[in-house]
Amino acid sequence: MKTTVDIPDQELKDVMRFTQATTKREAIVTAIADFNRRRRMAALIEHAGKADSLMSPEELQALRRQG
C-alpha cells in the first residue's frame, strides 16, 4: 500500500542505522514488523501463567510413556 508520511529526518536515519537497512522502505518495513512482533509477544506474556487447565511437563511425559 502506498502512503505518504512525513517522518522526521533524524528518526529515519536512526531507524536505518539500527536496522542496517539500505533503503528507507526496508527500514520502515523492518521497524513496523519489529513493533508488531514486540506487541504480539507482550500480549502473549500477559497470559503467561493464567491457564490452570494446562498439564505439567511431568504429566505430559507420563501420558507419552503410556502410549
Image: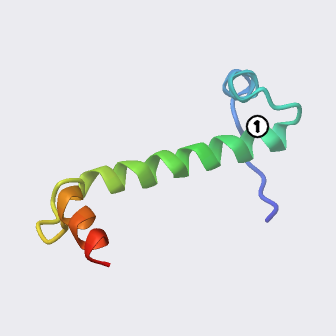
**Which residue is painted at 88% across and 36% down in the image?**
23
Left or right placement of residue 57 versus residue 8 in this view = left
* Residue 37 drawn above or below residue 12: below
Q: Which residue type does callout 1 highlight?
A: Ala
* Residue 8, position as x, y percentages in the image: 69, 29
Image quarter (top left, top right, bottom left or bottom right) of the N terminus: bottom right
Quick one: label 1, few (<14), some, or many (20+) residues within 10 Å?
many
Most distant residue in the left direction: 52
51 or 32: which is nearer to us?
A: 51
* Residue 23 drawn above or below residue 63: above
52 or 30: which is nearer to us?
A: 52
* Residue 10 drawn above or below residue 6: above
Image quarter (top left, top right, bottom left or bottom right) of the C terminus: bottom left
**Which residue is painted at 28% across and 69% down in the image?**
65
Quarter holding residue 61 = bottom left
Most distant residue in the front direction: 66
Left or right placement of residue 39 versus residue 1 in this view = left
Most distant residue in the right direction: 22
* Residue 42, position as x, y percentages in the image: 36, 48
Quarter holding residue 40 = bottom left
* Residue 32 drawn above or below residue 13: below
The residue singled out by tag 1 in the image is 27
53 or 15: which is nearer to us?
A: 53
* Residue 31, position as x, y percentages in the image: 65, 40
56 or 31: which is nearer to us?
A: 56
Label 1 secondary element = helix
* Residue 21, position as x, y percentages in the image: 81, 31
